[in-house]
Image (cartoon, rainbow, N blue to C red):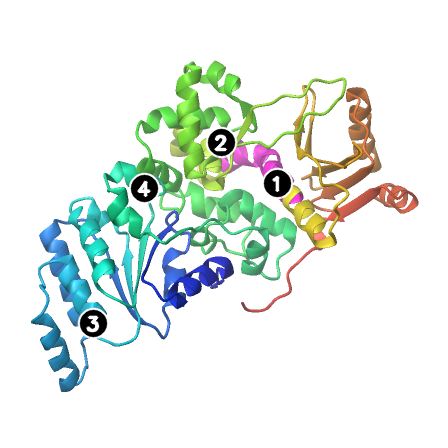
Amino acid sequence: MIIKREKEYHRLCEAYEAPENRLVILTGRRGIGKSTLVRQFIREKNAYIYEGVECSGERQKQLLKTSWQNLYHFGETQEKQSAISRIRQTVSENTYLGIFQQISRSKPDKTVIVIEDFMKITGTDPIFYDDITTLLKQEENIMVIMTSSTMNWREEEAGISQRNFVGQITDRIVLGEFELLEMMKYFRGLSMADVIQIYALLGGVPGYLKYWDVHGSVQKNILKLYIEKDGQLRGEAENYLRSELRELSLYNTVLEAMGKGVVRLNDIHEQTGFGRAKISVYMKNLKKLGVVAKCKTIDLKCREKGMKGMYEITDSVVHFWSRFLYPAQTELALLSQEEFYKKRIEPYLEEYTSVYFERVCVRYMGLMTKYKNRSEFDGRTGAWYGEKGHIPYVMESRDDKYQIVYGRWIEKAFSRKDLERFVRYLISAGIEAEQYYIFTKSDFDEQLRQKAARVKNMHLINFSNIRSEKGSV
């Protein structure tokens, strides 16, 4: 299923409509949908696409020229071929610049040149940067889109002069993972609870989502994707990290220490023995990749001391790998697939998924607050982590009142006793809320429903009843 990236698509359209030449750098991890977006955009446009390959500079130019001739000259009239021959007499076919000039001059309307995985070209032939710069300065009516699956590309690391290539960049687009609403569109007909489970296991990377069998059980999908030796995602996390980071063994150690949930840097220090300065560098690099993030926390005036400086893994595939697969390689090799699942995954899957459930609850509240224009709660927001428990999301009002979000990812119905235990904890910690939003995966028991009907400050949200309607996008 193809879902158009509306915001990014609109930015490409704006760049195309601009009167001046445009250079767009489009980045995003492998499988995120860069090629799909670009191919949607260039439909019915005068466009040329070249996929960069890892080879010598001279061979790259030959492949570029050959693909231009084979794919874009085939079936042209004698008159058109004669026109291209006249252009060839004015430009060199042995440079990137000359080939691109030939392409740009072949038709009168605006030309879109797409270079996929451009770092495969520049890695062995940095002159490519200079030729693109000259092309944009000398020619007219051109839009160049250069894509990269390497998230850590930096101009300074590539040794590119600011006044040359970097000065020509007009648009930078980073293609991120699907958000909740896009996930719901992708899996039309499934309940939000089902989508959250998929999100916890695969994240919002379209290239991963296509592997999920909506007719199979969670266990069947985990076995197929992660546990089988040829599973599509068995080694994906390590391959991704290896392509972006050095000292993979050290990063693996940090991620394993984080695998069980939200942690402080001091927790990682105690579990790994690494120095705090070294850990800070690792976390900085992992944050750049979108693998980890610092939790947004809020400081409450209460009896129980809140913890700050909390971090969590935000990449689902890396999280699953570091939590379940990386620390159990021997068992993964010796146990049957079903035995491994029953022993190493099933008992902890509910706890693992609850982390993502809470994130979705927070995003849901953000969307609802924005939709209903709840401006009275426009103060500080964030999670609160106490020594004996935590609150996934707190919203502060102008007069220091709190709106609290709490969720439970459990199969059985959320009961009144469950809520009372949570409220007793809040009271013991000295936290008083004006509004309570309670989320559950499955259902609420009748006693809790009756209580919520009698009071005005309790709101119950059951994700199992929220679905997207079936249909096509």
- Residue 410: where, in percent of width, then height? 69, 39
In the picture, measured across the screen, residue 142 lies left or right of residue 287, that is: left
On the image, numbered disc 2 is attached to which residue?
323
Does residue 344 show up magenta in the picture?
yes
User: Can you say whether 285 is above or below 199 in the image?
Assistant: above
On the image, numbered disc 1 is attached to which residue?
359
Closest to the camera, between mark 2 and mark 1, is: 1
Say whether residue 139 is visible: yes
Kindly report the distance in space between the C-alpha atoms of the residues bearing marks 1 and 4: 29 Å
Residue depicted at x 24% and y 48%? 164
In the picture, measured across the screen, residue 240 lies left or right of residue 473, that is: left
Helix, strand or loop at mark 2: helix
- Residue 403: where, in percent of width, then height? 77, 37
Q: Amino acid at mark 3?
A: Arg
Closest to the camera, between mark 3 and mark 2, is: 3
| Neighbour tally class for label 2: few under 14, some 14-19, many 20 plus, Cα within 10 Å | many
On the image, numbered disc 4 is attached to which residue?
153
| Neighbour tally class for label 1: few under 14, some 14-19, many 20 plus, Cα within 10 Å | some
Kindly report the distance in space between the C-alpha atoms of the residues bearing marks 2 and 1: 18 Å
Q: Amino acid at mark 2?
A: Arg
Highlighted range, magenta: 339-361
Closest to the camera, between mark 3 and mark 1, is: 3
